[in-house]
Image (spheres, helix red, strand yellow):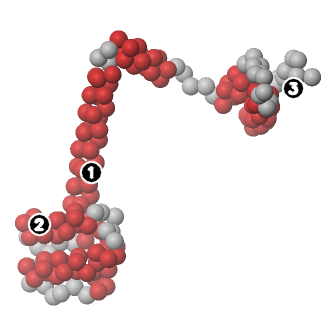
Amino acid sequence: MLRSDIPEMAKQLNRVADVYDRKPLTDGAVEAWFDTLKEFRTELVQSVLINVPKREGKWPTPHAVWKICNEAEIDRREAMRKSEDAIREKEIEFLGATERGREIIDGIRKILRKPRLTPIQHWQRIIDAPLQVRQGDPGYPIDSKEMAREALSKLMGESGGGQRIPSREPGED
């Protein structure tokens, strides 16, 4: 809810107060209600306030209305997640309809099953990779190996690992 929704919320709260033969709410009371319910969508809060006389036999507390709104939001998010899961499942089904699609899905699953590298393993792989320099390349592979050495030396200093990091690649002279 936004601050601009306070007057409309105050009107609705005062209508509910009339139903329960209560005095109109003060500005401070409306502010307290707003602070309690501001995390929810305006439409949801208004809907709950309109339906309070159907649910409650007595004047509701802000906490009771908050609980109703929270349960409604949880239900909405779960329904949205189920809908997204169904769409994702259909997309996978559609992709798997062809031989190439099944190959792609199998490749993705294979990648996801691989164990993840630790940061040390990642940087060591970059250092150990063969140097590939293309004509006109401004030294990117060499820079990436140097960056990997720096990152690895920092990690080794933090972890206290005893692995030796080569200071230079053969042929970099």
Query: From the viewer's perspective, is residue 110 above or below residue 141?
Result: above
Q: Circle 3 — which element?
A: loop
Q: Quadrant of residue 59?
A: bottom left
Give the numbered dot on residue 2: none
Q: Circle 1 — which element?
A: helix
Query: From the viewer's perspective, is residue 141 above or below residue 50?
Result: above
Q: Nearer the viewer, mark 1 or mark 3?
A: 3
Give the numbered dot on residue 51: 2
Q: Circle 2 — which element?
A: helix
Query: At which x and y percent is residue 112?
Result: 47, 23
Q: Name the kind of residue labelled 1 in the image.
A: Ile
Query: From the viewer's perspective, is residue 44 above or below residue 145?
Result: below
> Disc 1 versus disc 3: distance between alpha carbons?
55 Å
Q: Quadrant of the N terminus?
A: bottom left
Q: Which of marks 3 and 2 is in front?
A: 3
Query: Which residue of the protein is positioned furthest toward the top in this rendering?
Result: 99
Taking depth in this image into account, of 56 and 148 the one nearest to the observer is: 148
The residue that appears at 32% across and 25% down in the rendered structure is 92
Q: In which quarter of the image is residue 101?
A: top left
> As drawn, is 7 to the left or to the right of 134?
left
Residue under pointer 3:
167
Q: Name the kind of residue labelled 3 in the image.
A: Ser
Taking depth in this image into account, of 64 and 71 the one nearest to the observer is: 71
Mark 1 vs mark 3: which is more N-terminal?
Answer: 1
- Tags 2 and 1 touching, CB below 8 Å: no
The residue that appears at 70% across and 22% down in the rendered structure is 125
Residue under pointer 1:
74
> As drawn, is 28 to the left or to the right of 147?
left
Mark 2, Cα crowd under 10 Å, few <14 / some 14-19 / many 20+, is: few
The residue that appears at 34% across and 71% down in the rendered structure is 2
